[in-house]
Amino acid sequence: MIDDLGIKSAFASITSQALLKALLVIIIASLVIVAVQKVLPRVAEKLGGKPRLYLLASVPLLRLLIIFATITVVVPILVEPSFENMVAIFGALALALGFAFKDYANSLIAGIVTLYEMPYRPGDWIEVDGQYGVVRAINTRAAEIVTPDDTVVIIPHNKLWNSLIANGNDGTDNLMCTADFYLEANHDVSQVRDLLRDVAFTSPRTKTWQPVLVIVFNKPWGMHYRVKAYPFDPKEQFQFVSELTARGSAELARQNVKFVSVPVVAD
């Protein structure tokens, strides 16, 4: 049990001057955090590619370092830095956080693990519990993702413990996209594969130095084709898939290759 007298003696030396100093440090730290959160993402958007992703990933780490540095500076200002005082203060804080903020502390610890292991970073396209979107920010307790329909979803970091997290680009600018075509069976498979591969290679959005694959599945209702390719920018994935689908459908129509006209059970 934490000694109440130890806690009282630890705060006995606090003066109005010490409070003003601590407040000034906290204000400066808050302004620095706001500046980091505003300036670095804007700089990152101008860079593009991997430097953009690395710079975005440094934002939550810098914020955490500033918070720790602020605590390191403020505590000695308010409390005489003796061993007994530190044990009393941090012991009381640990008990308070443990009982009053159990779930928050769980997410906070998971947030620290997130910064270390980096299962996702700002700029990554992830899916958690059926929610898919780009990571906009990694805060102390949770990550913010923006879905394709421009909805902001808050995902607590403690999802790390019990949820599957799918990361589409994993800190890079390489994100594979898939366009699906459901066709009747009476056609030349090799010709259609070559046609769809050419459609992907000739798209101005395609990274032609990355693999372009056309996968074929034989189904009871016909043939299922999947065109897999990488767009230049993960943010363009939906426009990219739409373009592949539209151009591929037009070329198939010119070759008199027909699409199936019955509902298809998802693979």
Image (cartoon, rainbow, N blue to C red):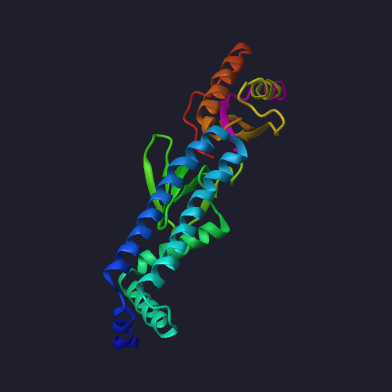
Instruction: Using residue 86 as the reference point, say whether residue 256 is left or right of it.
Output: right
Residue 164 placed where, x, y %?
A: 51, 55
Residue 64 magenta-highlighted: no
In front here: 70 or 108? 70
The residue lying at 55 percent from left, 23 percent from top is 245
Residue 80 position (above or below residue 42): below
Quarter residue 255 falls in: top right
Residue 81 placed where, x, y %?
A: 42, 78
Instruction: Using residue 130 as the reference point, say whether residue 16 is left or right of it.
Output: left
The residue lying at 39 percent from left, 67 percent from top is 74
Instruction: Using residue 105 as the reference point, say whether residue 12 is left or right of it.
Output: left
Locate the N terminus and report the quarter of the image it occupies.
bottom left
Residue 144 position (above or below residue 178): below
Q: Is residue 73 visible?
A: yes
Residue 180 magenta-highlighted: yes
In front here: 124 or 250? 124
Which residue reaches farthest front?
17
Residue 89 placed where, x, y %?
A: 36, 78
The residue lying at 41 percent from left, 79 percent from top is 86
Residue 7 position (above or below residue 38): below
Which residue reaches farthest top?
254
In front here: 177 or 37? 37
Quarter residue 241 falls in: top right
Q: Which residues are magenta?
A: 175-193
Residue 37 placed where, x, y %?
A: 44, 45
Q: Is residue 176 visible?
A: no
